[in-house]
Amino acid sequence: MVKNRLDSILLSSVAFLIFIYVTVTFISLKNLPSINEFDTPPFSNHHHFNNNEGNQPSDPSNRFPISIYEDPFESIVHPATEIVPSLSLPNLMVPAFYDPPQFEKYGGIRSFLGYGDTLMTPEQAQMIGSKVNGKETIFISIASYRDYQCRQTVESIFLHATHPERIRVAVVDQIDKSEDRPCSEPQEPCSKDPTQVLCKYKNQLDFYTMEAKYAMGPVFARHLGNRLYRGEYFAAQSDAHVDFILDWDTKIISDWNHAKNEMAVLTTYLSDVTGRMDSEGHSLVDTRPIMCRSDFEDSGPYSHLRHGQQPEGPAGIKGEPTLEPFWAAGFSFARGHFVINIPYDQHLPWIFQGEEISIGLRGFTYGYDYYTVRFDDPCHYEFWSLV
């Protein structure tokens, strides 16, 4: 009797949440303009930087950098119309997922890696990842929603790297074109100052720019970010308001190597940058953030699970990263096959709470392990005051 009553309460709560979700969705989107009210399609403001000039080696997996604009884009429906089909919203033209031709005979690169039906073998894992001048390449995906510090984050990535030549950054830039400065726009025209990061490293940058009014939350934005990956050895994900310490790339690769685990994912909630970095980019702390706290917030039908971070302190384990149970969306660093095997879901609009739980569970069941970094490599700006 008690069990039946609990089941009834649970079903009623779920039904109530679905009703609220659909109602809010319809009210929020019903007044958005159709595509005919724009002079140009709202998702067409892409910045094309292509340095290949037709020089294509026989093995595309060894090329770097590869721009998303070398291949045709594909059309997908706007996720909001999957919830409210009556909405008049344009399809999105988006980059196709990375799927080089040498994997066609296996049914594509995800099928080659097992597609979740079988575990990826060490030999298969070693087939993923480009190098430049013998150094492993790094892909960093940034989803930015009207974030004025996006350009500063991109500049920090390159200026503070030991080997900026091996880094490729791809930004999903969701902006209000009437008010916001694009993340792709340098302070001065490149013709006037070609030494600016956005000019000097333009061939290692891709920007997918879209109207902020059509944004659907972090899950969909980061899904688009996964589509910008192009075969790099390492794949990272970062917020758009992060400062990176000096030599962050060699330090975090060293940290990953010390895990001695092909399936290691370094991830954590980043800390406030105040008092943690000097003017030259050197870290001033030796503490370690770690995610070992999770609890339910709110109550009743609004109760939801939320991850937290323990107060920082000196590392209890020396010389290697520490295992932790959770995955953080604000910073993640892993092998490139993590993005291939565990891409963000295309069909989860307006999800914030639950984003990290979804990726964390999917990654863990696929065999990935989560670690906190040994070094407090990137440092976070004051998050809540900027978003």
Image (cartoon, grey):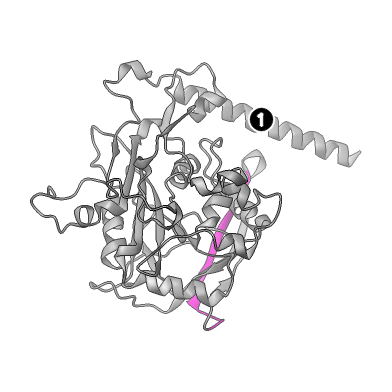
- Closer to the camera, 60 or 386? 60
Total residue callouts: 1
Indicate the position of residue 132 as horizontal and vertical percent values: 36, 64
Q: Position of residue 103 (x, y in %)?
A: 55, 48
Q: Position of residue 206 (x, y in %)?
A: 33, 47
Would residue 216 be counted in the magenta stretch? Answer: no
> Could one spot residue 296 in this view of the protein?
no
Question: Overall secondary structure of the magenta stretch?
Answer: strand
- The crowd level at tag 1 (other Cα within 10 Å; few <14, some 14-19, many 20+) is few
**Along the line of sight, which residue is nearer the eye, 190 or 361?**
190
Give me the residue at 41% from left, 65% from top. Answer: 271
Q: Is residue 107 visible?
A: yes
The extreme front residue here reads 58
Where disc 1 sits, the SS reads: helix
Residue stretch in magenta: 303-318
Q: Position of residue 279 (x, y in %)?
A: 23, 72
Identify the residue position indicated by label 1 in the image: 16
Q: Label 1 amino acid?
A: Phe
Left or right of 21? Residue 386 is left
Q: Vertical placement of 253 versus 152: above or below? A: below
Verify whether residue 314 appears in magenta. Answer: yes
Q: Is residue 338 above or below residue 175?
A: below
Q: Note whether 100 is above or below 245 in the view shown.
A: above
Closest to the observer, 250 or 107:
107
Q: Residue at x 25, y 39 (%)?
A: 180
